[in-house]
Amino acid sequence: MTSRWPDDYFEKNIADRIKAVGHRQYVGGFSDQLWYEIGKLQYHFLVQQGLKPEHVFYDVACGSLRLGQYLIPYLNDGRYHGLDLDQTLIDIGIEKEFYTDIIALRNPRFFVNEEFDFGISPNFDFAIAQSLFTHLDPDDIRSCLSAMRGKCHAHSQFYFTVFLKEGRSPENPGGPSDPNKNWFYRKEDIEDFCETTGWYADFIGDWRHPANQMMFRARPAGR
Ligand SMILES: C[S@@+](CC[C@H](N)C(=O)[O-])C[C@H]1O[C@@H](n2cnc3c(N)ncnc32)[C@H](O)[C@@H]1O
């Protein structure tokens, strides 16, 4: 099978990877159509789940704002919170994906770190990590779930997607988590990650993701 990534891509640092393929393809938008489709899919899914403009929203691993392009205008002033490990992606998203002064009008807040630290923001009502756990090893998934548990209230809903593989434990890439490599998990692995970090896991499953990523909802346990 031919790779979607250029030769020597995986030897490059993040900034050079983004330069090589562009801010849309870097986050898995392999065509402009797919970029918009996956953004709109998340937007409509969240509104269907009950997201309202007044809710505090966390976009966990917001990347180059594929969802932010829709949710930043939709949410009220200061309600959108985006976090990613890479500042360049956020900067390019802001520069290339918005018209007029919608950013100044809505005041989205951004956080750049690998610890899923949303700082002193209010606890979230809704959050999504779209195509994040698909690129994380088990330790990093647990770190994310634990950090999010510390920022939730009794009715918070944290949606996240995974690649599911049923049956025996799947073979995953060696080495550290990597945004351009894929990890597969069993449903029971995901349930275990949630249970050990203080969440109930609801399996939502197929939500029409073009690469067949499955959706889960985490709700705080014991509250
Ligand atoms: C496949 S992209 C998806 C981005 C976005 N959710 C979307 O739907 O376009 C994965 C993103 O996860 C980010 N990421 C990976 N590990 C992270 C970590 N530990 N903390 C914050 N962001 C991370 C990457 O920088 C990348 O932007």
Image (tube, grey):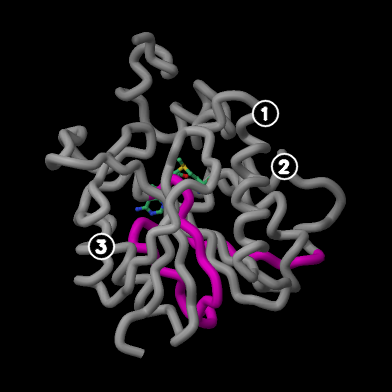
Pointer 1 with pointer 3, Cβ within 8 A = no
The residue nearer to you, when weighing 203 against 220, is: 203
The reply to whether residue 171 is visible in this rendering is yes
**Within 10 angstroms of label 2, few (less than 14), some, or many (20 or more) residues?**
few
Q: Which residue is mark 2?
A: 97
Amino acid beneath label 3 = Glu
Identify the disc placed on residue 99.
none
- Of the 4 image quadrants, the one containing the C terminus is bottom left
Q: Nearer the viewer, mark 1 or mark 2?
A: 1
Q: Residue at x 32, y 66 (%)?
A: 145
User: Looking at the image, which residue is at 20% across and 63% down?
Assistant: 192
Q: Position of residue 178 (x, y in %)?
A: 31, 38
Q: Which residue is mark 1?
A: 33
Do tag 1 and tag 2 residues touch (Cβ < 8 Å)? Answer: no
Q: Amino acid at mark 2?
A: Glu
Mark 3 highlights which residue?
Answer: 191
User: Which quadrant would residue 119 be assigned to in this image?
Assistant: bottom left
Q: In the rendered structure, which segment of residues is drawn in magenta?
A: 105-132
C-alpha separation, residue under disc 2 versus residue under disc 3: 36 Å
**In the image, what residue occupies the spot 42% across and 18% down?**
5
